[in-house]
């Protein structure tokens, strides 16, 4: 059976989740569930983490599907993987590489790291959608995934802001993020240069979305279950 129906199924599942959880879809709710992180917030911290993890896992799965489809269609035999070492614009962030390293970072710093990485993808994902729309004969599956990833990453960013307001009430919002230098390559005239820019962007986002998903699971285990999970 053709697997191309799976992204649609995943989108429907996520839509049901968001409709039932207006925290991640403000247009659904008549009033914000956790406006300004007030003490009367109706959603528990555990539920906020549950929703963030479901969304981060969905984003990572989409990014993996999009990368694999793009790689199979456009970059086979080009040897791009060898060029991606230390090529991600977020590589300068000091990010833990495994669970043991992640556990050594206090939860405030880890939450802020997740927020910084998400902020740093706002611009690249916007230009990814714009560039994919401009490609000739691009499969609709790639375009739809690019649009979905951009939209849901914004939703996750807003969700993380709410979690941080709950955990660190009164803390100033930290919007430090890294400059993304890939736009000239993505808009370049040389086809191989453009394809590598696409490939590298998708490769790096798949990497970072996986890290975010893992960090959130560690944070939930630590903050909700006191590491008993």
Image (spheres, rainbow, N blue to C red):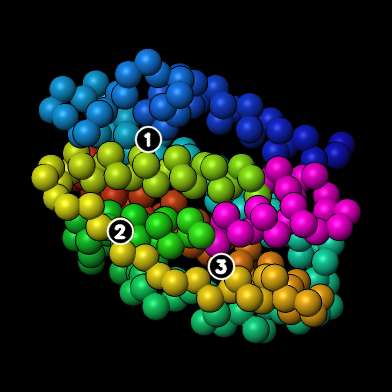
Q: CA distance from mark 3 to mark 1?
A: 25 Å
**Can you give x and y, in whole percent of width and height, for residue 11 in the image?**
63, 32
What mark, if any, has residue 219 been given in the picture? Answer: none
The residue tagged with tag 3: helix, strand or loop? Answer: helix
Residue neighbourhood size for the residue with mark 2, other residues' Cα within 10 Å, grouped as few (<14), some (14–19), many (≥20): few
Please report whichever mark, 2 or 1, sits nearer to the chain's N-terminal start: 1
* Numbered circles on residues, count: 3
Residue neighbourhood size for the residue with mark 1, other residues' Cα within 10 Å, grouped as few (<14), some (14–19), many (≥20): some
Residue neighbourhood size for the residue with mark 3, other residues' Cα within 10 Å, grouped as few (<14), some (14–19), many (≥20): many
In the image, residue 63 above or below residue 99: above
Taking 53 as reference, is 149 left or right? right
**Quadrant placement of the C terminus:** top left
Write the start and end of the magenta stretch as one range: 124-145
Q: Is residue 117 visible to us here?
A: yes
- Nearest to the eye among marks 2 and 1: give it: 2
Q: Which residue is mark 3?
A: 204
Identity of the residue drawn at 84% across and 62% down: 73
Q: CA distance from mark 2 to mark 3?
A: 20 Å
Q: Is residue 64 visible to us here?
A: no
The residue tagged with tag 2: helix, strand or loop? Answer: loop
**Quadrant placement of the N terminus:** top right
Q: Which residue is mark 2?
A: 175
Q: Which residue is mark 1?
A: 50
Is residue 33 one of those drawn in magenta? no
- Nearest to the eye among marks 2 and 3: give it: 2
Please report whichever mark, 2 or 3, sits nearer to the chain's N-terminal start: 2
Foreground: 217 or 161?
161
């Amino acid at each position: 059976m053709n697997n191309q129906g799976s992204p649609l199924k995943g989108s429907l599942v996520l839509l049901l989740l968001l409709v039932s959880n207006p925290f991640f879809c403000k247009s659904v709710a008549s009033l914000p569930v956790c406006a300004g992180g007030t003490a009367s917030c109706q959603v528990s911290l555990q539920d906020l983490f549950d929703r963030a993890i479901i969304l981060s896992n969905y984003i990572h799965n989409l990014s993996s599907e999009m990368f694999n489809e793009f790689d199979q269609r456009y970059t086979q035999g080009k040897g791009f993987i060898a060029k991606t070492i230390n090529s991600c614009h977020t590589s300068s962030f000091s990010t833990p590489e495994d669970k043991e390293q992640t556990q050594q970072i206090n939860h405030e710093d880890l939450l802020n790291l997740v927020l910084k990485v998400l902020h740093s993808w706002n611009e690249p994902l916007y230009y990814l959608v714009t560039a994919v729309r401009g490609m000739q004969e691009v499969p609709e599956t790639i375009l739809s995934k690019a649009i979905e990833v951009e939209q849901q990453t914004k939703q996750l960013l807003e969700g993380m802001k709410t979690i941080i307001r709950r955990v660190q009430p009164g803390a100033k919002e930290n919007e430090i993020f890294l400059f993304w230098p890939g736009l000239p390559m993505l808009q370049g005239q040389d086809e191989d240069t453009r394809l590598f820019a696409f490939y590298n962007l998708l490769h790096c986002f798949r990497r970072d979305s996986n890290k975010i998903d893992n960090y959130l699971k560690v944070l939930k285990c630590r903050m909700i279950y006191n590491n008993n999970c």
